[in-house]
Image (cartoon, rainbow, N blue to C red):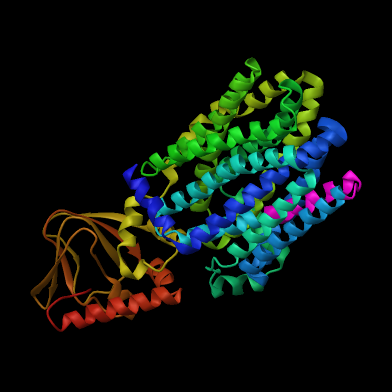
Amino acid sequence: MRRGGRAVAATASNPPFARLAAARLISVSGRWAYTVTLGVYAYAAGGATAVAWVGLLRIVPAAITAPFAWPTAMRIGVHRSLLAAGLTRAAAVAVAALAVHRGGAAWIVYILAGVESAASTSSRPLQNALLPRLARTPEELTSANLTLSTIEATGVFIGPAIGAILLTSTSVTTVFLVGAAAYVVSAVLVRTVGHEPPATERTTHDHQSIVRGAVRGIRDVVGDPDVRLIVGLYGAQNLVAGALNVLIVVAALQLFDLGSGGVGTLTSAVGVGGLVGGLIVLGRLAVARHGRDLTIGLVLWGVPLLLLAALPRVGAALILLALVGVGVTIVDVSAVTLLQRAAPADLLGQALGVVQALFVGSLGIGTLLAPVLIHSLGLRWSIFATGALLPILVGTLWRRLSRLDSGLVSERAVDLLLGIPIFEPLPMPTLEGLAALLTPRDYAAGTTVVSEGDFGDQFYVVDRGELDVIIAGRHVRTLTAGGYFGEIALLRDVPRTATVAARTDCALMALGRDAFLAAVTGPPESRDAADAVIAARLGSLRVGFGGV
């Protein structure tokens, strides 16, 4: 918990992320107030079937537009895209409020809901793709995902509660206007986050068509078996979520007879559970077993619904839906973190856009499936069937899930690289890519690792032990854990400037010449850091301390 607390504190002290988090909280709260109210409006207009259809009309445009969000952003800029999406969804909800106020046709409200959903769905992958650039360690990346997931849970609690209160005391129009205002405030905050992708990335995408960029993202997702597994299970969870959105509305109005405010009450229970799930994930930050956590979260998504079907009581429903909320946060953090760490940095935005489209599509299938199940099986058996899906998938895929964690990059390797000034400016995905390329090398005491005058083809980081740096036969320094050598020969293309020999048994990590040069000579900040390190090393040679 202490280590997780440090990561959360570090994340909270990051001003751009703090603004992103505030924007997410405001927009999620407003969106859930709007979504719950839209469900009540649709149910009054046409029952459970209308709720399902409005869900579909929100999902289809979102699924179509999501893969194109990142390629489009690479042309006009991420922050312009986010601002445009925020203002678009605000306008759609505001016009829907006007339509409801004037007694317009329900289909107008539903179509505007589709516009709002498409804009909202485009925003999320863009925001998530910025996170690895803001995070400085793997723990901070997980902490950032945890924070945003907890914010989602908070919004699921606050938004429906606001919607329920306003529905009881005011009108559908008022709630819609509150949602529109929240979107405007959120868009303005996100605009100030900063951390636009580097010019090199944007230039690459400028020469690609938007369609080619989307296709490349799809290829990246389907080409990796672990990514396919994560996406498939996360998609199954979204299918259950789509069905549950409809089932909660029908259960509140029919099974429990709670009235329109009851929809917000039951939905808020999921949000409360999400907050509890955030505390659980916080306590597990240091463990970094995201594959195991994904498994636990999926089970928590399904089993409470099985129990709810057997115990249809309001009190039990609130507790069980809170358990579902715990699973929501655990799955969101673990699955998104696994995806962020699996996808290459330059394809992350595209991959997340494709993933978002798949999730929205599965949400739509679940939304359409719910009324069919209710008509065929009745409400309670529909809840049971919905809850059974995820535990069955977990049981079937248990072995593959248990292997997900073994594919994660060693956090020890990442920590060692983080301690080297040359690598500090690099974004976390690049650091993890380098860490994955490190090769362990063991040397017995007395062994010479590199010799003065030799050709340099490796960069070395000391994991354990002590090594002597010798120049012209004279001992000039001792390297210990966290030390490094070999950068001068690689960056200046000169022979080794010193001999390095193991004083004790040593464990080193070696990085090849090409990978090292590609990493540190690309971003300007890293080049500057490398030049500063070399200047210090070469300067120290003149006063008796050495580099290699």
Q: Relative to residue 194, is residue 336 depicted above or below?
A: above
Q: Residue 170 vs residue 135: left or right? A: right
Q: Position of residue 272 (x, y in %)?
A: 55, 36
Dominant secondary structure of the residues highlighted in magenta in the image: helix
- Where residue 287 sits, quadrant-wise, is top left
Quarter containing the C terminus: bottom left
Q: Position of residue 381 (x, y in %)?
A: 71, 19
**Residue drawn at 67 percent across, 21 percent down:** 384
- Residue 235 visible? The answer is yes
Residues 389 and 318: in front is: 318
Q: Position of residue 247 (x, y in %)?
A: 72, 29
**Residue drawn at 39 percent across, 39 percent down:** 283
Q: Is residue 113 magenta?
A: yes
Q: Relative to residue 241, is residue 432 depicted above or below?
A: below
Q: Is residue 248 magenta?
A: no
Q: Residue 265 vs residue 38: left or right? A: left
Q: Residue 252 vs residue 282: left or right? A: right
- Where residue 206 sits, quadrant-wise, is bottom right
- Where residue 238 sits, quadrant-wise, is top right
Residue occupying the far left of the picture: 474
Tally of numbered tags: 0
Quarter containing the N terminus: top left
- Residue 60 visible? The answer is no
Instruction: Report the span colored magenta.
Output: 102-121
Residues 177 and 16: in front is: 177
**Residue drawn at 73 percent across, 31 percent down:** 249
Q: Position of residue 292 (x, y in %)?
A: 46, 35
